[in-house]
């Protein structure tokens, strides 16, 4: 024996068990936070669009939704905005960013800032 203390790996194994449990909970919590955030932005965007689109695009607010995409267990992406397949959803770019003849509404940008 060289006089060096022996390495006690019990605490390392205990940390490993703890982390294996916490990672699963963190994944569930992350998904819930992403869903809630996307829902809040979608709802704000819809409310802003109802106020700004008026009589010119009455169906546009109903086209706004979101999708939550998973790229493996630890990578999530929320896509929020108008569905171009729904009535007046294709007007999203024009209404949000404007054109030469129309000012931008910035409904989605304002919803994101809330």
Image (tube, rainbow, N blue to C red):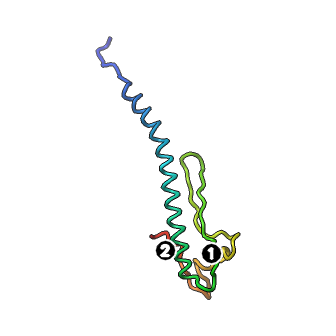
Say above or below: 16 vs 97: above
Disc on res. 92 = 1
Q: Quadrant of the N terminus?
A: top left
The residue positioned 53% from the left and 81% from the top of the image is 51
Which percent across, then down, holds residue 79? 59, 62
**Could you say which quadrant of the image residue 87 lies in?**
bottom right
Which percent across, then down, holds residue 86? 69, 71
- Counting residues from the start of the chain, the first of labels 1 and 2 encountered is 1
Say above or below: 62 vs 55: above
Which percent across, then down, holds residue 65? 60, 66
Say above or below: 20 vs 86: above
Cα–Cα span, label 1 and label 2: 14 Å
**Could you say which quadrant of the image residue 96 lies in?**
bottom right
Find the residue positioned furthest to the top: 1
- Relative to 87, 79 lies left or right: left
Residue that numbered label 2 is attached to: 110
The residue positioned 55% from the left and 82% from the top of the image is 52
- Relative to 57, 52 lies left or right: left
Q: Nearer the viewer, residue 25 or 14?
A: 25
């Amino acid at each position: 024996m060289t006089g060096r203390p022996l390495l006690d790996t019990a605490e390392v194994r205990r940390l490993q068990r703890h982390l294996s449990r916490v990672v699963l909970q963190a994944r569930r919590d992350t998904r819930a936070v992403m869903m809630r955030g996307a829902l809040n932005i979608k709802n704000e965007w819809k409310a802003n669009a109802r106020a700004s689109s008026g009589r010119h695009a009455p169906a546009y607010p109903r086209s706004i939704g979101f999708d939550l995409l998973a790229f493996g267990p630890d990578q999530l992406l929320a896509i929020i905005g108008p569905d171009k397949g729904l009535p007046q959803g294709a007007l999203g770019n024009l209404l949000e960013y404007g054109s030469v003849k129309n000012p931008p509404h910035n409904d989605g940008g304002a919803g994101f800032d809330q």
